[in-house]
Amino acid sequence: MLGVLAAVLVIAGLVLATTAPAGPSTSNKVDAYGPAPVPKKPTNPKTKAECNKYYSATNQGSEARGCRALATYNTAKRSCAKKSGSKKAACLKKAKAAYKKAKAKLATQAKAEKACSTAYTTATNQINQQIAALDPSAPDYDTQYQALLDQQTAASNAQAACLKKAQKG
């Protein structure tokens, strides 16, 4: 009887050992090459693709748009370099004017984005202070806490709408 019980325990132990989850898998590639390199921020982009690689094509923030505007300007300068004489001068003048106009629009957008972020930070700081001041033993604690969380959600939605408006304008 004792021998049968020992055999059952050994078999049960083997089954558990073989069906146990494995530890974290290791990749020889990561060990050999290290982690993936962090993409570098383009400082003087030659094409919009360089900007899109860093910021993503869907990012409409002022930094991303500024990068794309500079890339467009650099592309225009390269195409102007192929021309000569008065055509080259007119081409460069047109490219500079377009870039100057884009930079002015970007400055307005950046200012609006900063105003959105400042308003959001101010609102959430006040809400967080109110949350910290709540008394957990108060009978209406849950109601007050939920109301403050709703205010936080509203502030987040307001910031998203503000940023969307800033990026459209």
Image (cartoon, rainbow, N blue to C red):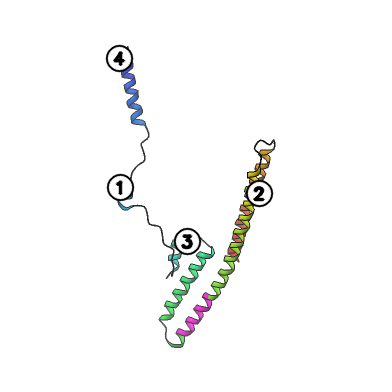
In the rendered image, the quadrant that contains the N terminus is top left
Please name the residue that numbered disc 3 is placed on.
55
- Disc 4 packing (10 Å; few <14; some 14–19; many ≥20): few
Tell me, yes or no, whether the two marked residues, 3 and 4, touch with CB atoms within 8 Å: no
Q: CA distance from mark 2 to mark 4?
A: 68 Å
- Chief secondary structure of the magenta span? helix
Q: Earlier in the sequence, mark 2 or mark 4?
A: 4
Q: Earlier in the sequence, mark 3 or mark 1?
A: 1
**Marking on residue 3:** 4
Please name the residue that numbered disc 1 is placed on.
28
- Disc 3 packing (10 Å; few <14; some 14–19; many ≥20): many
Q: Earlier in the sequence, mark 4 or mark 1?
A: 4
Three-letter code for the amino acid on which mark 1 is drawn: Asn
SS at badge 4:
helix
Q: CA distance from mark 3 to mark 1?
A: 30 Å
Q: Position of residue 121 (x, y in %)?
A: 60, 55
Q: Earlier in the sequence, mark 2 or mark 3?
A: 3
Q: Is residue 39 magenta?
A: no
Three-letter code for the amino acid on which mark 4 is drawn: Gly
Front-lying residue, 79 or 134? 134
Q: Say if 57 sits above or below 21 in the image.
A: below
Q: Position of residue 5 (x, y in %)?
A: 33, 16
Q: Position of residue 45 (x, y in %)?
A: 43, 69
**Marking on residue 151:** 2
Tell me, yes or no, whether the two marked residues, 3 and 1, touch with CB atoms within 8 Å: no
Three-letter code for the amino acid on which mark 3 is drawn: Tyr
SS at badge 3:
helix
- Which residue is at a point 62% across and 49% down the rendered structure image? 153
Q: Earlier in the sequence, mark 3 or mark 4?
A: 4
Magenta region, residue range = 88-99
- Which residue is at a point 32% across and 26% down the rendered structure image? 14
